[in-house]
Amino acid sequence: MHILSTLTTDHDNIEALFKRFEATDPGDAEALGHLRDQILEQLAIHAEIEEQTLYPALRQADEDAEDDVLEALEEHHAVKAILAELERMAPTHERFRAKMQVVIENVRHHVEEEEGDDGLFALARQELKATELKEMAERAAQLRDHGPTRPHPLSPDQPPFNVLLGLPVAVMDRVVTPLRKVVEQHLLRKAS
Ligand SMILES: [Fe+2]
Ligand SMILES: [Fe+2]
């Protein structure tokens, strides 16, 4: 297993969640909220993996990759900012689905660029060694178990600070998310 196959599988899983979100009855707030939570978590983990492994390695391996990596980081940042709003928004809010649709469109564009013929994944295949790609997959597995699970648009997204802060942030995420879910479920039941 190497990093590009795990990241491509993430893209496919996230796209499947997007399709389910788009197909969900707009009146089913509980289902929309549940899908929002899954999308939020999957995207947070995926972005963290790319920002701690593939992106810095590409920047180091090929200075021509710099502009594309910086653009990718900006696209991650924009999506995290909207996700941070969605995390705090009730699924019954009139802007909820529209906001998620903007996330979906942005991520689809970003994934197309990453996986495209002259995108970052193609560049990684060209520039990085098989051993490096395999090591990154091992780091990705650790991040899936112990990395941040919520969007943090204001946190550092490049080494060394994202690596240093990743662990304490992840510990807090695992406290905040269950609490927020309990409060939201309570409010949804009260409203229905
Ligand atoms: Fe990305
Ligand atoms: Fe990606």
Image: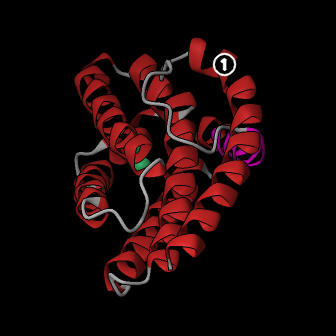
Q: Is mark 1 within 8 Å of ligand 1?
A: no
The residue depicted at 77 percent of the width and 33 percent of the height is 171
Mark 1 residue type: Leu
| Magenta-span inclusion, residue 142 | yes
Dot 1, crowdedness within 10 Å: few (<14), some or many (≥20)?
some
The residue depicted at 46 percent of the width and 65 percent of the height is 14
Q: Is residue 3 above or below residue 159?
A: below
Q: Quadrant of residue 6?
A: bottom right
Q: Nearer the viewer, residue 3 or 160?
A: 160
Q: Is residue 36 found left or right of 111 in the rendered image?
A: right
Q: Which element carries disc 1, helix, strand or loop?
A: helix
Q: Report which residue position mark 1 lands on.
A: 165
Q: Nearer the viewer, residue 101 or 192?
A: 192
Q: Is residue 29 above or below residue 105?
A: below
Q: Is residue 59 above or below residue 134?
A: above
Residue 134, percent across and down? 66, 44
| Magenta-span inclusion, residue 176 | no
> Which image quarter holds the N terminus?
bottom right
Residue range corresponding to the magenta coloring: 136-146
